[in-house]
Image: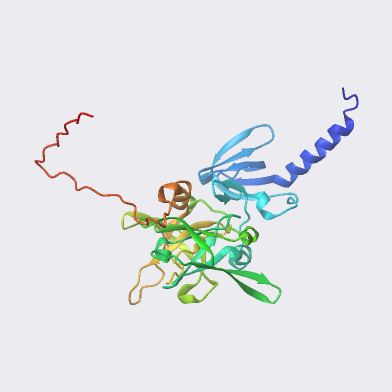
């Protein structure tokens, strides 16, 4: 039996109090209310918020901002983010100006090179998974990922020639690649945001390699959160997107990926009409990636699509066969 609880309680309190202070946040709501407590979990449509005496589920649409207070925890940045399948989200991520955001997230944006061209992509976890467009790597078997690392003397290219295709889907125009190198664990990655929370006029920015001009940054605003594009839906923005930007990330002010850039409207005098695959669609693709798994031995799915029955067609009668 422990007779003296004081040292044990003191040590417990010090550990718990330090954790609570490190994770305390201030929430500002649309109705003007200000709440202080701890963000327990951040979902696509809501926040789980602990007031200390009560846990609330707050609709994300009602939250204007989340601000951290107290000192941040020691340790790598990845310790402060939550795993959601193979990607991550980061509660209470601080909004920053574009120039500071570029410094924060730029290292996770990569160039995807193939024998027939190049595109962009971004790293989503420590396993070296890279997101890009399916059309960037379609028909390719030799893929190279180029990472740009910030050094004292400037940017330094780091080339990873061993890259595997994990999954891809032509209709969604999404693909998952994996850098097949132990050094991938040391590379920075970016969190995935909530594209459903985007609003018209909200500022966004893109990083990519348009026309091979690596690490180019362009900024714009959300024109329409969900625009019908050939049976799917896309984020329409004024962000400049050109060939080479394909597969690169569209970021919000919190440095979260809210879209995957994949196309633009072209024509004489046509500018500022860029389109991105919503991040929430990307999340569905990632969570159901087994359905789109790439098999190098059989790149075709093997599915046969039957024509719909014409008016007057009679149902086929199938006679069971004796074994």
What is the total number of numbered labels drawn onto the structure image?
A: 0
Please, is residue 27 above or below residue 96 in the view?
A: above
Decide if residue 274 is in sight here. Answer: no
Instruction: Write down the quadrant of residue 147 in the picture.
Output: bottom right
Determine the residue located farthest toward the left in the rendered image: 312
Tell me: 107 left or right of 210.
right
Determine the residue located farthest toward the front in the rendered image: 323
Please, is residue 29 above or below residue 113 in the view?
A: above
Tell me: 236 left or right of 22.
left
Residue at (50, 63) in percent of width and height: 121
Q: x, y (%) of residue 3? A: 90, 24
Please, is residue 210 above or below residue 89 in the view?
A: below
Q: Which of the two residues, 254 or 172, is positioned nearer the viewer here?
A: 172
Q: x, y (%) of residue 66? A: 62, 49
Decide if residue 211 is in sight here. Answer: yes
Tell me: 96 left or right of 171.
right
Tell me: 48 left or right of 318.
right
What quarter of the picture does the N terminus occupy? top right
Q: x, y (%) of residue 71? A: 75, 51
Q: x, y (%) of residue 72? A: 73, 51
Determine the residue located farthest toward the right in the rendered image: 4
Which of the colour schemes (rainbow, by chain, secondary structure, one colour) is used? rainbow
Please, is residue 19 above or below residue 113 in the view?
A: above
Q: Which of the two residues, 33 or 150, is positioned nearer the viewer here?
A: 150
What quarter of the picture does the C terminus occupy? top left
Residue at (79, 40) in percent of width and height: 15
């Amino acid at each position: 039996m422990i007779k003296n609880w004081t040292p044990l309680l003191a040590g417990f309190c010090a550990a718990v109090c330090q954790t609570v202070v490190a994770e305390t946040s201030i929430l500002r709501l649309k109705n003007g209310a200000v709440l202080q407590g701890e963000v327990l979990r951040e979902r696509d449509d809501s926040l789980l918020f602990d007031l200390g005496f009560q846990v609330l589920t707050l609709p994300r649409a009602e939250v204007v901002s989340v601000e951290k207070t107290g000192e941040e925890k020691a340790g790598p940045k990845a310790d402060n983010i939550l795993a959601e399948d193979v990607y991550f989200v980061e509660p209470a991520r601080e909004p920053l100006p574009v120039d500071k955001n570029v410094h924060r997230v730029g290292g996770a944006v990569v160039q995807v090179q193939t024998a027939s061209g190049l595109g962009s992509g971004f790293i989503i976890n420590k396993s070296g998974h890279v997101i890009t467009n399916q059309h960037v790597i379609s028909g390719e078997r030799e893929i190279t990922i180029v990472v740009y690392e910030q050094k004292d003397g400037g940017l330094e290219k780091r080339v990873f020639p061993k890259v595997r295709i994990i999954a891809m889907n032509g209709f969604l125009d999404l693909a998952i690649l994996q850098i097949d190198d132990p050094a991938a664990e040391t590379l920075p990655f970016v969190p995935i945001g909530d594209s459903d929370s985007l609003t018209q006029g909200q500022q966004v920015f893109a990083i990519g390699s348009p026309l091979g001009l690596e690490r180019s940054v362009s900024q714009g605003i959300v024109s329409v959160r969900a625009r019908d594009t050939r049976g799917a839906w896309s984020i329409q923005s004024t962000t400049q997107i050109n060939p080479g930007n394909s597969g690169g990330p569209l970021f919000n002010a919190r440095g979260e990926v809210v879209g995957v850039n994949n196309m633009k409207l072209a024509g004489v005098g046509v500018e500022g009409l860029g389109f991105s695959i919503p991040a929430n669609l990307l999340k569905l693709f990632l969570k159901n990636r087994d359905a789109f798994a790439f098999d190098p031995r059989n790149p075709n799915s093997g599915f046969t699509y039957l024509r719909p029955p014409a008016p007057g067609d009679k149902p086929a009668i199938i006679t069971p066969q004796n074994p």
